[in-house]
Amino acid sequence: MTAAPALTPRAWTLLALLALIWGASFLAIRTALDEIPPLASVVYRTTPAALALWLWVALRRLPVPRDPRLWAAFLVMGVLNNAVPFSLMAWGQLHIATGLTSILNATTAVWGVLVAALVFSDERLTPRRALGVTLGFAGVATAIGWRALAAFDITSLAQLAVIGGTLSYALAGAWGRAVLRGASPEVAAAGMLTGASLVMVPLTLAVEGPPPVDLAPRTLIAIGYYALIATACAYLLYYRILAVAGSGNLMLVTLMIPPVAITLGALVRDEVIAASAYAGFALIACGLVAMDGRLLRRPRQPRRG
């Protein structure tokens, strides 16, 4: 694995901005869930975001692929990266705090390393990565709480739903690496969200009925934020950071999101999460640092003349 580029002040600024956008999305989604059901919240997220990204593609005059196999890949990617995780996490947020949801969401990178090691021959599970995965899963168990796992109630099920969403994200990452080639990131994101909408609209109609349209202003604002800002614009910002900072540094966003979500949940919704959740996040953070490896390397000694 090649070393990640050094973080410039500009890259740090973009990382912080993305963390703020995604951290606030947990509050926006929870606000919308006060009035709309979970599957409808996903439809209101993927469909406007897809339209916004296709508008961006048209304005940039980016080539749109015509290969049916690539569009089928977009559909699968939309299911794995949007439809499944968005639905599971939206339902989970009905029963657990937004801050805890963001902490559990941080395990996406842990699953990503494990899935990549199982699928790709060049992503071996080295001792350092195995340590990171172990710490990450220990953090998940700590954040959820061993007693909660033993009791297993609706809260435990909600937390496991969020974990299921992060596993789906990891599977999407492996799928995207394997099949999504030949399309620009913007087109891939637009196609993925389109595929998710094609799945979610009929599913929502069948399970929940037509999504409500007579919504309160605060719900409309929340939907507008998490669909257009935290999804469409965030994807464009994500790929911009990827270009200037590298994939290794993007992992830092995972650690920067929970503090934002926890703070906003406490300020706006008076949410309080258990001390075990903070301890779990600390373990997850240690696991991500171990997998990244840069802080564990010995600094090079300057050569003497």
Image (cartoon, helix red, strand yellow):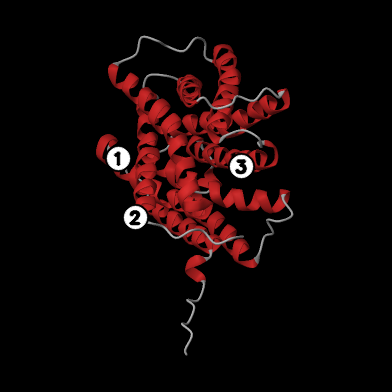
Mark 2 = which residue?
9
Q: Which element type, helix, strand or loop, lies under badge 1?
A: helix
Which residue is painted at 65% across and 36% down in the image?
A: 180
Mark 2: amino acid: Pro
Mark 3: amino acid: Gly
Q: Are marks 2 and 1 in contact (CB under 8 Å)?
A: no
Mark 1: amino acid: Leu
Q: Which element type, helix, strand or loop, lies under badge 3?
A: helix
Residue 173 marker: 3
In the current view of this chain or complex, which residue is farthest to the left?
A: 267
Q: Are marks 2 and 3 in contact (CB under 8 Å)?
A: no
Please state if 26 lies on the left or on the right of 108 as rendered: left
Position above or below: 90 against 166: above
Q: Earlier in the sequence, mark 2 or mark 1?
A: 2
Please state if 271 lies on the left or on the right of 89 as rendered: left
Q: From the viewer's perspective, is the residue at label 2 or at label 3 nearer?
A: 2
Mark 1 = which residue?
264
Determine crowd level at label 1: few under 14, some 14-19, many 20+ residues with C-alpha closer than 10 A: many
Of 122 and 263, nearer the camera is 122
Image position, residue 92 (x, y; %): 48, 34
Of 159 and 221, nearer the camera is 221
Which residue is painted at 58% across and 24% down in the image?
A: 196
Q: CA distance from mark 2 to mark 1?
A: 25 Å
Q: Are marks 1 and 3 in contact (CB under 8 Å)?
A: no
Q: Which element type, helix, strand or loop, lies under badge 2?
A: helix
Q: Earlier in the sequence, mark 1 or mark 3?
A: 3
Q: From the viewer's perspective, is the residue at label 1 or at label 3 nearer?
A: 3
Quadrant position of residue 189: top right
Please state if 230 lies on the left or on the right of 135 as rendered: left
Which residue is painted at 47% across and 35% down in the image?
A: 235
Quadrant position of residue 129: bottom right
